[in-house]
Image (spheres, helix red, strand yellow):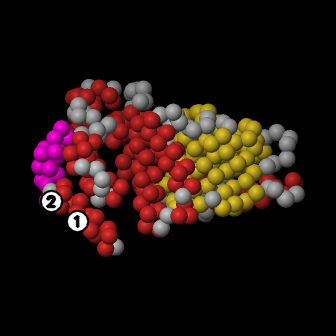
Amino acid sequence: MQTIFSTDGVIPKHRFRHWWDVCEDRLVPMEQNCLGEEPFDAAIDGASIGGLAITKFALRNLRASTTPRTLRHENHKTDHLFMSMVLSGTVRADQNDRSSTDRTGDFAIRDTSTPWTIEHSGYTEVLTVAIPRERLESVLGSARIFAGLTVEGHLPVATLARSFLSNLLREEDRLPPHVAERMAGVGIDLFVASLAERLAREVPRPVHGSVVIQRAKAYVEANLHDLDLDPRHLAAATGVSLRRLQELFHEHGQHISYWIWQRRLGAAANRLADPGYLHMPLGALAYGCGFASQAHFSRRFKERYGLSPRDYRHRALSQAGAS
């Protein structure tokens, strides 16, 4: 990562003003205040990998908020969401009626379209990744469902996501552009899976029907490998009756079983087209997407895509090599 800003060598009384200007350009317009009497101290490092803007902030004693006023600023960005991972220290945060204290390894999504507040007491290091809003919302639903929800760093997929991002940053200068872009996509997929895993653990509570649907879909994303995943299992995991869940899916013009199989087939198609899965036998790939047998997988896949899994993989990888 390259250094973008540092208070080293800056006269103490000018540090915060310099920080404010650079920070608003790198992230979003915010109202910010220093906490405590110590001279302000901060540094920003940045990298761009496969189109992803990744930023590391090291700072001390700061409170920052987006407000209705800052949300109207001409530089405000609403087409991206920000993944914010704590590398050191603790960060207090509030958004969408959620309050949390994020610790080392934890991460959360900040939604740039609604007000939020973060507070750094003492020294903290935070890594942020600007992720296209559509990449998260197309799978998990509206950002209001998951923004501000802490994903604990000890969760299995979150651990994998953190390790992958760390290694990706370590190798950034050695990756050809097409590889960097593909690896950035893998990183986003890991964060999506981490959020789905966390959403699936939410304590069920009376909520609007569309939120139940999104929670159910998040559970499916996190458990595609589970051979027992069916409508009855999904209803129990979501905290509603099977009849109620069927009604909600029907209101959205969908059937539960059909949705589950479409997601399994979609995940399989993505893996077949990914060179990173080239070593994986078709039987293992099918099992990992929730199919009980390779024969069943091949039949359902050909019905959906018009090609056998083997031919689909060959065509997708040939097109990728040609491009």
Q: Quadrant of residue 107?
A: top right
Task: Identify the residue position indicated by label 2 in the image.
Answer: 307
Q: Please report contact status of discs 2 and 1: CB closer than 8 Å, yes or no.
A: yes
The residue range painted magenta reads 291-307
- Mark 1 packing: few (<14 Cα in 10 Å), some, or many (20+)? some
State the separation of the CA atoms marked 2 and 1.
10 Å
Is 200 inside the magenta-drawn segment? no
Q: Residue at x 43, y 30 (%)?
A: 202
| Amino acid, disc 2 | Leu
Task: Identify the residue position indicated by label 1 in the image.
Answer: 315
Q: Residue at x 54, y 58 (%)?
A: 171
Q: Residue at x 22, y 65 (%)?
A: 315
- Mark 2 packing: few (<14 Cα in 10 Å), some, or many (20+)? some
The residue nearer to you, when weighing 2 against 203, is: 2
Is 301 inside the magenta-drawn segment? yes
The residue nearer to you, when weighing 203 against 312, is: 312
* Relative vertical location of residue 29 with respect to residue 151 in this rendering, above or below: below
